[in-house]
Amino acid sequence: MSGRMVVAGAVTSADGRLLLAQRRYPPEVAGLWELPGGKVEEGEDPAQALRRELREELDVDVEVGTRLERSVELAHDLTLVALWARIVGGEPRAVEHSRLRWVTVDELDEMAASGAIVPADTVWLPELSLRISGG
Ligand code: C5P
């Protein structure tokens, strides 16, 4: 792991769905779907950063769980990690994204197969599928 960390939230619902958010920018990934999140700021740990980012981006309070196993070395010396999370306050709305969607494991698989998921986030597909299908 090197440089700065970017933390994404694998936000799950009680009925076995995963929250995906559609990016508006930059052009390379605009229109693709991601696990919402953002950069960890100085003095924050990843869980604090994720709670802040999801408050800003989705207008919700989340409880953060463990880390997903995979991480990704992005360009610009950024390391992308993901944390499990669940909403404990508010209804998510797309403040910074164009849309939000709660997807089932089948929908997630279809979106991945059609290239609709942000490339970096595809490393988590096996872990996400296992968890939201009740594993
Ligand atoms: O969201 P933001 O632009 O702050 O993300 C910083 C970097 O992390 C960008 O390069 C973005 O594409 C990447 N990212 C990602 N997958 C996510 C969240 C961010 O690849 N789920």
Image (cartoon, rainbow, N blue to C red):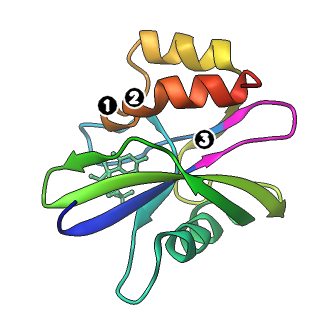
In the picture, residue 115 is in which quadrant?
top left
SS under mark 1: helix
The answer to whether marks 2 and 1 mark residues whose Cβ atoms lie closer than 8 Å is yes
Answer with left or right where residue 124 lies relative to residue 10: left
Identified by mark 1, the residue type is: Pro
Q: Residue at x 31, y 31 (%)?
A: 119
Circle 3 sits on which residue? Answer: 99
Q: Residue at x 26, y 41 (%)?
A: 27
Main SS, magenta residues: loop
> Which quadrant is the C terminus positioned in?
top right
Q: Residue at x 70, y 28 (%)?
A: 132
Q: Which residues are magenta?
A: 10-18
Identified by mark 2, the residue type is: Thr
Residue 60 is at least partly visible in this image: no
**Does 95 appear above or below 75?**
below
**Looking at mark 1, is its residue's CB closer than 8 Å to ligand 1?**
yes
Identified by mark 3, the residue type is: Arg
Answer with left or right where residue 37 lies relative to residue 58: left
- Distance (Cα) linking label 2 and label 3: 19 Å
Considering only order in the chain, which callout, 1 or 3, is on the residue closer to the N terminus? 3
**Does 64 appear above or below 124?**
below
SS under mark 3: strand
Mark 2: give few (<14), some (14-19) or many (20+) Cα within 10 Å. Answer: some
Residue 15 is at least partly visible in this image: yes
- Distance (Cα) linking label 3 and label 1: 18 Å
Circle 2 sits on which residue? Answer: 122
Q: Which mark is residue 119?
A: 1
